[in-house]
């Protein structure tokens, strides 16, 4: 995850984990970057309960709280947060257990977001707190004979989904290897 819920709630007490998941999905889609650290990867996965076991690779380079991405499985592709680690196993923080499967082609990879992405998401949350109630009204709009005007934000408009102002530079970078 880009931010932990407790960090985000220090900025906006009303934010939920679902909101943070949406931020993460949008950032990954807008930047065309999965932020995978290819140096920390495991292969030939068995997923059962809340545990991922790797036949090849190790958990070296992972820490509790890190985000991982599971790919090339039939049922369990997605982003997960590391809860505990063994040499070849990862237990994830999840409310729903994995659908049991063994995947020769399955891959698990560490996800690492750079500081500018983390800062950008924090600024989006701050912007939503500051401007969220003012969305939709711009200069020149008359509402019952009174005029109301707010500054147009070029940075981003988190409440309407216009994120390109901040993350446009990330898109040009493409996939980065860390």
Image (cartoon, rainbow, N blue to C red):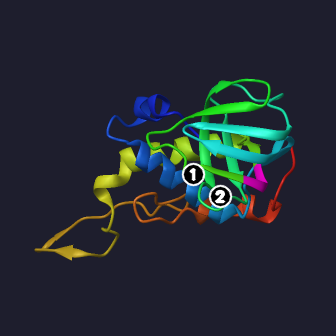
Magenta-drawn segment: 103-107
> Residue at coordinates 82% horizontally, 60% vertically from top-left?
173
Confirm whether the magenta stretch covers residue 105. yes
**Nearer the observer, 66 or 121:** 66
Q: Is residue 147 left or right of residue 176?
A: left
> Counting other residues with Cα less than 10 Å from the Cα at mark 2, is it few (<14), some (14-19), or many (20 or more)?
some
Q: Which mark is residue 16?
A: none
**Nearer the observer, 28 or 151:** 28
Q: Quadrant of the N terminus?
A: top right
Place of residue 67 in the rendered image (x, y in percent of width and height, measured from the top left): 65, 39
Place of residue 175 in the rendered image (x, y in percent of width and height, measured from the top left): 82, 58
Residue labelled with disc 2: 28
SS at badge 1: helix
Please identify the dominant SS of the magenta region: strand
> Residue at coordinates 51% horizontally, 66% vertically from top-left?
162
> Residue at coordinates 74% horizontally, 58% vertically from top-left?
33
Confirm whether the magenta stretch covers residue 62. no
Residue labelled with disc 1: 24
Q: Is residue 153 above or below residue 96?
A: below
Q: Is residue 42 left or right of residue 75?
A: right
Kindly give the residue lying farthest to the left in the view shown: 144
> Counting other residues with Cα less than 10 Å from the Cα at mark 1, is it few (<14), some (14-19), or many (20 or more)?
many
Q: Is residue 54 above or below residue 86?
A: below
Cβ atoms under marks 2 and 1 closer than 8 Å: yes
Residue 48 seen by the camera: yes
**Nearer the observer, 149 or 119:** 119
SS at badge 2: helix
Q: Is residue 81 left or right of residue 38?
A: left
């Amino acid at each position: 995850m880009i931010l932990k819920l407790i960090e985000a709630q220090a900025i906006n007490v009303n934010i939920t984990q679902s909101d943070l998941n949406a931020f993460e999905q949008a950032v990954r889609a807008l930047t065309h970057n999965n932020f995978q650290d290819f140096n920390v990867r495991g292969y030939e996965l068995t997923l059962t309960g809340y545990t991922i076991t790797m036949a090849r690779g190790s958990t070296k380079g992972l820490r509790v709280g890190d985000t991982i991405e599971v790919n090339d499985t039939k049922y369990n592709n997605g982003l997960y947060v590391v809860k505990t680690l063994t040499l070849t196993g990862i237990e994830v923080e999840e409310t729903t257990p994995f659908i049991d499967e063994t995947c020769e082609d399955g891959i698990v990879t560490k996800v690492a977001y750079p500081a500018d992405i983390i800062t950008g998401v924090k600024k989006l949350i701050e912007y939503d707190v500051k401007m969220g109630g003012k969305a939709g009204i711009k200069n020149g709009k008359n509402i019952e004979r009174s005029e109301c005007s707010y500054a147009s934000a070029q940075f981003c408009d988190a409440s309407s989904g216009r994120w390109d102002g901040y993350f446009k530079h990330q898109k040009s970078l493409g996939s980065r290897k860390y």
